[in-house]
Image: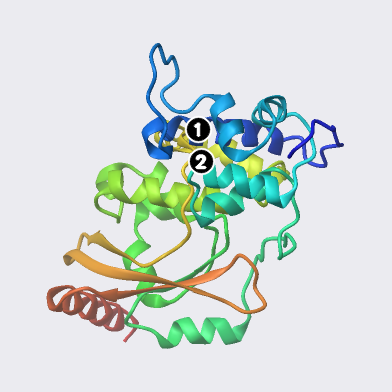
Amino acid sequence: MGDVTTVAAPNGRRRPELAAFLRGRRARVTPADVGMPPGLRRRTPGLRREEVAQLSGVGVTWYTWLEQGRPINASPQVLDAVARTLRLDEPERAHLYHLADVPCELDREALVAEVGPEIQGIIDALDPHPAVVYNGRYDILATNPAYRDLFDIPEIRATGVRNVLWTLFTVPEPACPVLFREKELPVMVATLRSEYGRHAGEPAWESFIERLSDASPYFAELWKNGDVVPPGPRVKTFRHPAVGEIRMTSVSLSINGMPECRIVTYTPNDEESGARTATLREMREKIWA
């Protein structure tokens, strides 16, 4: 199962990413996780390559070449076997498929750069609850007034970049509107990586990752971890200089006809947060009056 026939790699940047991803996932899995004795003199923190090959039913040479990022054939069946051995969850499995250049159900789509009036109308109608439209790279495609209430501060405007990751990683921490950065930012970077698998090697994506890594050593550190998670509901705590802390539940909604884009809505998580959100709206309406 699995041969060492080489193939032309259509996207050379994916192979190094594939190699790093497999090494990182292999290091997580202990012999005990797969019912094997620990053995003596183990120099690696997780499974050995030959153990992954044996458990997956593939040749040692084939798996070694796959983990080295060589351009070899990989069938869905073989990748599934490797994914099971490495205990990959669904987002990680999808990431493996993209990096190995194995076709998925959905073709890769270009990033959407703007939204139409219908989507803008939907998120405007959610006010006073903040709402935003992101693409897979966390570029900000549309916002409603309540979202701008949370994020429209001088330090963020000064960045000149309409990307929430850029904002959160580059503004001074005291000005960052999201509290508990050490908990929230790793999840966002892992969500970014789940999208990156579809775009590895594309100039716009590679440039963004490189520039943000240069601008933020913390982002660069998190990016090297290789974690992958999908978007999902979370409770986040924001801070605003006028009203204090606001606890919100975020929910991601996919948008038909806009691949890789999602509406993210925020609803207050308690009465105090709801009151503070309402206060922000009242302050805005007084300015507009």
**Residue sitting at 46 percent across and 47 percent down?**
189
Q: Secondary structure at mark 2?
A: loop
What is the quadrant of the N terminus in the image?
A: top right
Considering depth in this image, is 87 or 264 the residue closer to the camera?
Answer: 87
Q: With 160 as the anchor, is 281 left or right in this view?
A: left
Q: Are marks 1 and 2 in contact (CB under 8 Å)?
A: yes
Residue extending furthest toward the left: 272
Q: Which kind of residue does numbered mark 1 sit on?
A: Arg
The answer to which quarter of the image holds residue 170 is top left
Q: Is residue 20 above or below residue 147?
A: above
Number of other residues with Cα within 10 Å of mark 1, as a class: few under 14, some 14 to 19, many 20 or more: many
In 3D space, how far apart are the residues under numbered discs 1 and 2 (Cα atoms)?
6 Å
Q: With 63 as the anchor, is 49 left or right in this view?
A: left
Number of other residues with Cα within 10 Å of mark 2, as a class: few under 14, some 14 to 19, many 20 or more: many
- Disc number placed over residue 158 in the picture, else none: none
**Residue sitting at 75 percent across and 38 percent down?**
2
Mark yes or no: residue 85 visible.
Answer: yes
The residue under label 2 is 86
The residue under label 1 is 26
Residue extending furthest toward the top: 41
Q: Is residue 220 above or below residue 75?
A: above
